[in-house]
Image (spheres, helix red, strand yellow):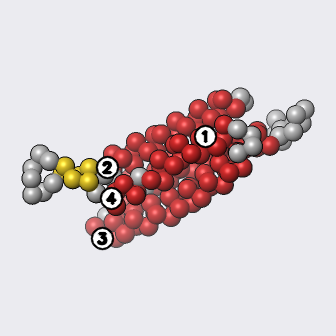
Amino acid sequence: MKKSTLVTALFLLAASGLMLHLRIHFFMVPDKLHPGEFIFDSTKLLASLLPLIDVIVVTALFISRRTAVYGYLLNGLIVIYGSILMAHYSIAEIMAKSIPFPAMLLKSTLPDIGIAWADFLVGKALYDLHMKKPGERQPGI
């Protein structure tokens, strides 16, 4: 597989995750005191910081072979932190609302965590491709 294809997949997964995240945690919230106006919520901006770093910094780091290791490391950290935070808040909301079991899976952040891990696995494939020595066969091919 070509590196450009994997970089594009990495970017699209990260951008899609950012867009989903902004849809849920948009940092301009309606002002309850002044209907029709919006106010800035810095806590929601911080919640969107990790997906934004994933889109811009991680993708940029994976473009070069010399910086791919840093992209791999940062991508892994973002996925681990994101998975823990999403699972925590999802479990807290499910427990607070007493959602029945079948609906738990659909109302949880499990699909979002799956997207994050798919992003990581594309990054791992790209890292492996970058670290392959010229002329060396890739394992499993």
Rounded to the nearest whole Å, what is the CA distance between mark 3 and mark 2? 22 Å
* Helix, strand or loop at mark 3: helix
Mark 3 residue type: Ala
Judging by the rendered image, the residue that carries numbered circle 3 is 96
Instruction: Indicate which label's residue lies in the foreground, 1 or 3.
Output: 1
* Helix, strand or loop at mark 1: helix
Rounded to the nearest whole Å, what is the CA distance between mark 1 and mark 3? 40 Å
Judging by the rendered image, the residue that carries numbered circle 1 is 60
Check residue 122 in the rendering and tell me which mark sits there, or answer none.
Answer: none
Check residue 42 in the rendering and tell me which mark sits there, or answer none.
Answer: 4
In the image: residue 63, left or right of residue 51: right
Q: Earlier in the sequence, mark 1 or mark 3?
A: 1
Rounded to the nearest whole Å, what is the CA distance between mark 4 and mark 3? 25 Å
Mark 2 residue type: Phe
Q: Earlier in the sequence, mark 4 or mark 3?
A: 4
Structural crowding at the residue carrying mark 1, measured as other residues with C-alpha within 10 Å and reported as few (<14), some (14–19) or many (≥20):
some
Mark 4 residue type: Ser
The percent position of residue 2, horizontal first and vertical second, equals 71, 29
Q: Earlier in the sequence, mark 4 or mark 2?
A: 2
Mark 1 residue type: Ala
The residue depicted at 50 percent of the width and 64 percent of the height is: 84
Front position in the image: 96 or 131? 131
